[in-house]
C-alpha cells in the first residue's frame, strides 16, 4: 500500500520572496494603528494642549525659565529705575528697584509669587524676553521656544517733576498726575503713601511677610490713587462747566452776565445752592467773577442751562465715562452721570453729587484747555527696545478728542489765569510764568461728614510765550491731617512745584 507523497505548501511570495502570514499582517496593522494613535496623541498634547499645559499651575518649567535670566528694565529718561539680582535659589533672578517707592505708581511690581502689575504687567512679555518682536528669527524661536534677552521700556516720566510730586505729597494721602498738553506724555504719576515693590519680588518667607503687611495696611499703600481711584472733583469741575456754557452759547463771554439768580434754588427743590463767600451773593455775576470766587450758585445754575446732554458731551470730551482709558495701564472710569434730574445736574456741575474723577482725567481737563481744546491721549510709555538698544516700537502722540473749540479754550485759559492772579489759586503763582488754575474742595461721606478732598488743576508756560504750555497738573489731597482743608492751601503749592520743575528743565 503506497502513501501519496504530498508537496509542501510554498511559503514564498511572488518573486520567490518570503510571504506574510495572515497573523503577521494583523500584527503589522495593529502596530501601524498604535503608531498613528501615538502620533495623534502627541499632536494633541504638543499642539492643541501646549498652551494650557504650559500655563498649568503644576508646571514650573516656564516659571523657572522666566527667572533664568535678568529681566529687562524700565527707564526714566536714560536711567533704569529697575534691575535684576541673582538669588542663588531655584529661580536664578528676581526683580529689584533702585527707588521703589518713588516710582511704584509708574512701574507697578513684578513678583515671583504675586505676578505683575502696571507697566511690569502690561509689558511683561517684552521685559521677560518672550515677546516675538525681540527675536531675529521669530518663527524658529517660537518652534524652539527660545527665550530672548528681556527688552526695555522707556517711560515718558520727567525725573524732576516726579521728584517734586513725591516730595510735595510727603506723608499726605493723595496723588499727582502731570501731562505735557501738546503730546499727552505723562510727566509725573505719584501716589502716597507708597510702597517698595522690591520688598516682595522674590519667593521667600520675607517676601510673603512683606506682602501680607502691605495688604493689611489700612492706608492702602498699594492703591494707585493717580490712576485707579476716583474722587469727587469739587470746584475743579467748574472748568468743564464754564467750557460747556461758553461752547453752547449759554454765556456769550467771560465778562458777560450769566443771568444767574441769587439765591439759586435748585429746580424741583426748596434748597438753595450755597456759596463759601459773600462775594458770590449777588445776581447776574459775570462768568469771570463766578470762577475767580468759585461761586457754586452761578456754576450750578449754568449747568442747568447747558442741560444734561450737553454737559455729558463736554465732560466726555475730556475723558469722563471712558471705561477703556489706557496709558497703556488702564485708568479707572471717571464718572459724570448720563441720567439726572435738574437739581442733580446743578450739583454735578460743581463737581458734587455722583461726579467723580481720577487725577489723570482732571489733568486731561487742564491739558485740554491748555492745548486749545484738543485733548491728547495720555501715554506713559515713550518707546520699547531690545536689550541691545535697537527699537521695537515708538509711541506716537494720538488725539483723544477735540473737547472744545480753540476760541472757547482761550477764554477758559483766561478764566483759569484770573483764578491764579486774583482768586483762590494765588499760591500757585510762579515768577516768570503765566499760570492758569482752579481750586476745589470736595465734600464727601454721609451727610458730607468726611474730611474734604483738596484739589488743584493747573497749567503753566513762560511769561510772554504764546506756545502750548509744557505742563498741566492735577493734585488731590485725600487726607493731610490738617484741620483747614482747601485746594488753594494744600494742593496748589504741590502743583506749583511740579510745574516749576518742568519749566526749569
Image: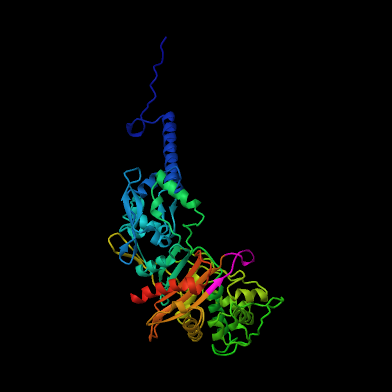
Residue 83, quarter of the rendered image: bottom left
Q: Is residue 444 magenta?
A: yes
**Which residue does the image show at 35% across and 69% down from the upper left?**
160
Q: Count up the numbered dots.
A: 0
Would you say residue 374 is visible in this rendering? no
Q: Is residue 87 above or below residue 220?
A: above
Q: Residue at 54% of width from left, 78% of height from top?
A: 240
Residue range in magenta is 440-450
- Residue 408 visible, this angle: yes
Residue 170, position in %: x, y? 43, 64
At horizontal 62% and vertical 72% (from top left) the residue drawn is 338
Compared with 19, 154 (above or below) is below
- Image check: 148 left or right of 212? left
Screen quadrant of the C terminus:
bottom left
Q: Nearer the viewer, residue 367 or 489?
A: 489
Q: Position of residue 132 (x, y in %)?
A: 36, 58
Q: Is residue 99 magenta?
A: no
Residue 200 lies, in percent from the top left, at 41, 50
Amino acid at each position: 500500500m503506497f502513501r501519496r507523497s504530498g508537496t509542501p505548501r510554498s511559503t514564498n511570495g511572488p518573486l520567490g520572496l518570503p510571504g506574510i502570514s495572515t497573523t503577521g499582517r494583523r500584527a503589522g496593522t495593529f502596530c501601524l494603528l498604535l503608531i498613528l494613535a501615538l502620533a495623534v496623541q502627541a499632536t494633541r498634547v504638543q499642539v492643541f494642549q501646549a498652551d494650557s499645559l504650559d500655563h498649568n499651575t503644576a508646571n514650573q518649567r516656564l516659571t523657572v525659565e522666566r527667572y533664568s535670566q535678568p529681566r529687562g528694565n524700565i527707564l526714566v529718561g536714560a536711567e533704569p529705575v529697575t534691575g535684576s539680582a541673582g538669588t542663588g535659589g531655584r529661580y536664578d533672578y528676581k526683580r529689584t528697584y533702585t527707588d521703589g517707592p518713588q516710582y511704584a505708581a509708574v512701574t507697578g511690581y513684578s513678583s515671583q509669587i504675586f505676578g505683575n502689575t502696571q507697566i511690569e504687567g502690561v509689558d511683561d512679555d517684552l521685559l521677560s524676553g518672550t515677546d516675538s518682536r525681540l527675536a531675529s528669527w521669530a518663527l524658529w524661536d517660537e518652534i524652539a521656544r527660545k527665550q530672548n534677552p528681556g527688552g526695555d521700556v522707556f517711560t515718558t516720566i520727567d525725573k524732576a517733576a516726579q521728584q517734586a510730586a513725591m516730595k510735595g505729597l510727603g506723608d499726605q494721602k493723595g496723588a499727582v498726575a502731570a501731562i505735557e498738553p501738546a503730546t499727552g506724555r505723562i510727566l509725573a504719576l505719584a501716589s502716597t503713601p507708597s510702597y517698595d515693590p522690591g520688598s516682595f519680588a522674590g519667593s521667600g518667607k520675607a517676601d510673603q511677610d512683606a506682602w501680607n503687611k502691605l495688604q493689611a495696611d489700612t492706608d492702602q499703600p498699594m492703591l494707585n490713587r493717580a490712576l485707579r481711584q476716583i474722587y469727587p472733583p469739587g470746584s475743579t469741575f467748574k472748568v468743564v462747566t464754564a467750557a460747556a456754557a461758553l461752547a453752547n452759547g449759554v454765556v456769550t463771554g467771560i465778562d458777560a452776565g450769566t443771568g444767574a439768580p441769587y439765591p439759586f434754588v435748585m429746580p424741583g427743590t426748596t434748597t438753595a445752592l450755597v456759596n463759601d463767600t459773600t462775594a458770590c451773593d449777588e445776581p447776574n455775576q459775570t462768568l469771570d467773577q463766578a470762577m475767580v470766587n468759585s461761586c457754586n450758585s452761578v456754576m450750578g445754575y449754568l449747568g442747568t442751562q447747558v442741560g444734561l446732554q450737553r454737559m455729558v458731551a463736554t465732560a466726555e470730551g475730556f475723558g469722563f465715562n471712558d471705561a477703556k482709558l489706557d496709558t497703556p495701564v488702564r485708568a479707572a472710569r471717571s464718572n459724570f452721570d448720563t441720567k439726572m434730574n435738574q437739581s442733580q445736574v446743578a450739583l454735578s456741575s460743581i463737581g458734587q453729587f455722583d461726579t467723580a474723577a481720577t487725577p489723570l482725567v482732571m489733568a486731561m481737563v487742564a491739558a485740554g484747555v491748555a492745548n486749545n481744546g484738543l485733548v491728547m491721549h495720555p501715554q506713559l510709555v515713550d518707546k520699547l527696545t531690545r536689550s541691545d538698544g535697537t527699537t521695537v516700537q515708538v509711541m506716537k502722540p494720538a488725539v483723544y478728542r477735540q473737547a472744545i473749540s480753540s476760541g472757547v479754550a482761550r477764554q477758559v485759559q483766561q478764566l483759569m489765569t484770573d483764578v491764579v492772579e486774583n482768586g483762590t489759586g494765588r499760591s500757585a503763582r510762579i515768577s516768570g510764568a503765566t499760570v492758569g488754575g482752579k481750586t476745589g474742595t470736595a465734600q464727601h461721606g454721609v451727610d458730607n461728614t468726611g474730611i474734604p478732598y483738596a484739589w488743584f488743576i493747573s497749567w503753566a508756560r513762560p511769561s510772554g510765550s504764546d506756545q502750548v504750555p509744557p505742563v498741566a497738573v492735577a493734585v488731590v489731597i485725600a487726607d493731610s491731617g490738617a484741620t483747614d482743608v482747601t485746594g488753594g492751601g494744600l494742593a496748589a503749592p504741590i502743583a506749583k512745584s511740579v510745574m516749576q520743575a518742568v519749566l526749569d528743565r
